Each structure stands twice: as structure tokens, then as C-alpha cells.
Image: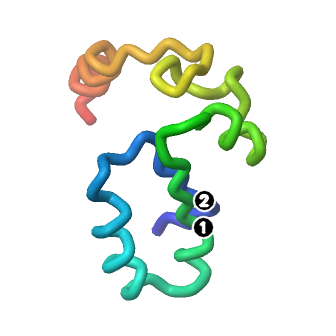
Amino acid sequence: PIRLAAMHVCYPPSFFSVIFSVIKIFLGEKLRKRVRNQGSKNVPAKLAEFGLTEDILPEQLSGKIKMDLEKWIEERKAAGK
């Protein structure tokens, strides 16, 4: 089981708002409040309001963490997971 404290949707496609409006109907009230659509303007500043500073964000979100997805996948495969 996973306990979701918050989920920030950053740079969503234009149709996300429409689809999410429908999905929200089926979510509980607590979960609806925990999902936040940050849009595509000034995302780093919006995330900083929640304590998500550039020190802990990946480069794709204007942060300082360099993520190599291909390397991570290869490491996971090598570990048998």
C-alpha cells in the first residue's frame, strides 16, 4: 500500500484538466485535495511554496539533480528487479 501525501502535476498536456475533472469525481475528498496541478507557468516557484526547492528537484523541473533514467534502468535490470 502507498500513502500519498501529495502529488504535483507539472507541465501537463492541455487536455489534462478535462480528464482530471472527470477522474476527480471518483477520488475521495482527501485524495482530491492532495493532487495539485501546477500548470506550466512558473512551476519552480509554485513547487518552492511546498518546500520542494531546486536542491531536490530534477533538472527537468529546473532543479539541480541530474537523473540518468537509462542508467537507472540498467542498474535495476542488473540487480534482477
Query: Percent position (x, y) of residue 49?
Result: 77, 44
Query: Percent position (x, y) of residue 5?
Result: 63, 62
Helix, strand or loop at mark 2:
loop
In depth, the one of 13 and 47 nearer the eye is 13
Q: Residues within 10 Å of mark 1 (few under 14, many from 20)?
A: few
Query: Percent position (x, y) of residue 76?
Result: 30, 26
Q: State whether residue 1 is above or below residue 68.
A: below
Q: State whether residue 53 is above or below residue 3.
A: above
Helix, strand or loop at mark 1:
helix
Q: Identify residue for label 1.
A: 34
Q: Residue at x 54, y 64 (%)?
A: 35
Q: Residue at x 44, y 82 (%)?
A: 27
Q: State whether residue 66 is above or below residue 41.
A: above
The scheme the figure's colours follow is rainbow
How far apart are labels 2 and 1 at the CA level? Answer: 5 Å
Q: How many marks?
A: 2
In the image, is 42 to the left or to the right of 67?
A: right
Q: Identify residue for label 2.
A: 6
In depth, the one of 17 and 6 nearer the eye is 17
In the image, is 44 to the left or to the right of 24?
A: right
Q: Residue 7 lies in what quarter of the image?
A: bottom right
In the image, is 70 to the left or to the right of 35?
A: left
Q: Residue 47 lies in what quarter of the image?
A: top right
Look at the numbered discs 2 and 1 and tell me whether their residues touch, using CB distance below 8 Å. yes
Q: State whether residue 70 is above or below residue 41.
A: above
* Residue type marked 1: Arg
Q: Residue at x 51, y 17 (%)?
A: 59
